Amino acid sequence: MRRYKIYANKLIVKILFVILFFLTAGSGYPQKSTGAMHCLGNGQYCVYQDGMEIKSIFGPSYSSPSYLQLNLKDKNIAVISTRLPGSAIWKHLLKLNGEKIAEITDFVDSKLPVFVRKIVAYKSFVLDLTILKDPLITVIDNSTDFSGKATFALMVHKDRGLPIYGVYLYPYEQFQQIVIRESTSLHISNESGHYELNIGTGQSEIYFIGGPLYQESVENTDQILALSFKELYSRTLKNWEEFTKRRIDFASRLTNKNPDKRIILEQIDNVAVLLKTQQSSEGAVLAGHFYHLGYVRDQYGVSRGFLALGYYKEAKSILDFYWQIWRKFGILHNAQAIGVPGVFHIHENDEVELTGYLIIQAFDYLNKTNDSLFVKTIYPMLQWAWEAQKRNLVKNMLPFNGDETYVAGGILPRTTLNDGSAESTLLFIQSGRLLLPFMRNNNFGSKDSIQSDEKLMLTVATHYGNNFIQEGKLMANNPLRMSIEEMPEFRHGVCVGGHGVVYTRKDKNGNYLCPKCYLEKKVFPPYERKSFYIPSIALTPKYIGSELITEKLLRQNIEVIKSSYLKSGQISSRPGINIVIGYEYGFLLYALSKYHDPLADRVFKDAMSVVDESGAWVEYYRDGKPMGCRYRPWESAINIEAIIEYALYKENK
């Protein structure tokens, strides 16, 4: 099944939506799915869909396991999915052999943890409901509980212990109620956990209702059944309209002389909804449909996106999410569970990179809002993030975080993690240049300690060129930071033998192995210690506002990127590698726009060309094709901020 998105400017939404919806009703469409995802969520309850098929549904909280799916049984049915602009309300038209089968409206309610589906069927069809078969999951037919208010109902109980992500287990019970109203019938197949929903002609309503606990699930169900579909739809639409009104009015900032105005406004709306649906009530934003956690690095880019769109409250909520966790545990890691206290995703070197981003994020927010009271409140967390970076300085360099994008994407080998990182070290310097004057101006810390830190920061900055610049190129790493002998014997991170993120031990060649690989004396070859040149590293200073690297050197490195781009016809994360990090379109476009470079026009078009059917950018691209996690906030936020920068540069040209 393939879906086509239809978007329109807000003033003519209703007219265009109705016209386009019915115009498409007589056409045939390709059947194959592209794998594009979109999210429906209200901060408590989250649904990821591929077209109208539910691929995961979970919550409360957003860090919950998913164990339910709802798919079409007949894969020959074509689905044309459209999003109502300014909202996460989706409409789906189902067709078979050119004949209209059904119209479906989907949304997550604005107040309660419930997914709402209304079906108007012209022909009968079947939906497959699949519930994970697991000893921890119990399904109970509780139709008789509703005194005729429901055609059928299932209560799904998940006991403690299913994974949120990877090895991280959800420690509480959860209940989800599935309620069917109107003309739907249900057939239980022979396979355990598999149900067929026979959708008859006429109108049907399906509700997935979260709790998470039993009492909450019952109370939420009672409230939902007391309301009509129209009431739920109206309050949800109103809530989305209020959200959209808070956005910066880009329609008035961009003049009609801009030929790309319409698609830029559409993409701004796409990303605004993408970010909001994946933001939890606690403030953290999911990292896409795979990752039900709040990642510090990812949320730095998301915060930048919120700020660029004018959503200052949402940006503040991310910082507050960290603050609440840090107050309780005194630490942050690569990622934190959302609404599940004490669950951390721990990677190698979690005291670097993300800590620099955290400080810079706080000052990005301060510069946009002048909310100094809030930044003063969270200062103890920012001080911790500063001290954590200091502890990892060796030869005036910081190492890589284990989930660093280029490492995680295979562009840099994992063996570089304890090398000096140009990016982590740059983040340390920039975070210090923001934090230390703030400390001095607000009498945080003694004058001697601040002066000592300023001297340290200056020393690291002074040595930065010698450590990372070679023959006019900004290198990604410096292997001289630490020898194999100096590297720690144990660390929590990725096993070279491929056994996931676990506690590891160093072998004689500097490879980190899980206990099984180590005790079995598995041998891996020693790795080559060398420096790597990744041209796009030179885009980071411009993005974070650092003035450490001279304009001459930055322009020189950007010329290398431009030359490679013009020769190959595509952005490349590293020469000879056909994988592109999803946000590199934004990094390059942002820099070119700042420099008023004419090549920005072409990069803008390239960035827009890889947007998928749901209006999102993804984690990686291989040969221009989506790869990895879909519907990504980090990449989408960075790219939309760059597009806004580009659009405003073009207006003032």
Image: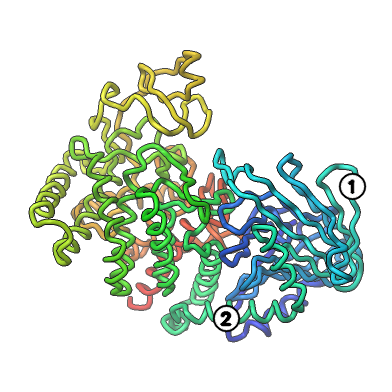
Q: Quadrant of the C terminus?
A: bottom left
Which residue is at 40% across, 41% downward? 574
Which residue is at 64% across, 45% downward? 160
Q: CA distance from mark 1 to mark 2?
A: 42 Å
Q: Total label count? A: 2
Which residue is at 57% across, 44% downward? 165
The image quarter in which residue 20 lies: bottom right
In the image, 101: left or right of 322? right
Residue 408, percent from left and from top: 45, 40
Q: Is residue 501 visible?
A: yes
The image quarter in which residue 229 lies: bottom right
Q: Amino acid at mark 1?
A: Ser
Residue 303, percent from left and from top: 41, 63
Q: Residues within 10 Å of mark 1 (few under 14, many from 20)?
A: few
Residue 467, percent from left and from top: 20, 38
Residue 165's place in the image compared with 519, above or below, is: below
Q: Amino acid at mark 2?
A: Glu
Q: Is residue 606 visible?
A: no
As helix, strand or loop, the secondary structure at mark 1 comes to loop
| Residue that badge 1 annotates | 189
The answer to which of marks 1 and 2 sits earlier in the sequence is: 1
In the image, 95: left or right of 200? left
Residue farthest along the front direction in this orientation: 215
| Residue that badge 2 annotates | 241
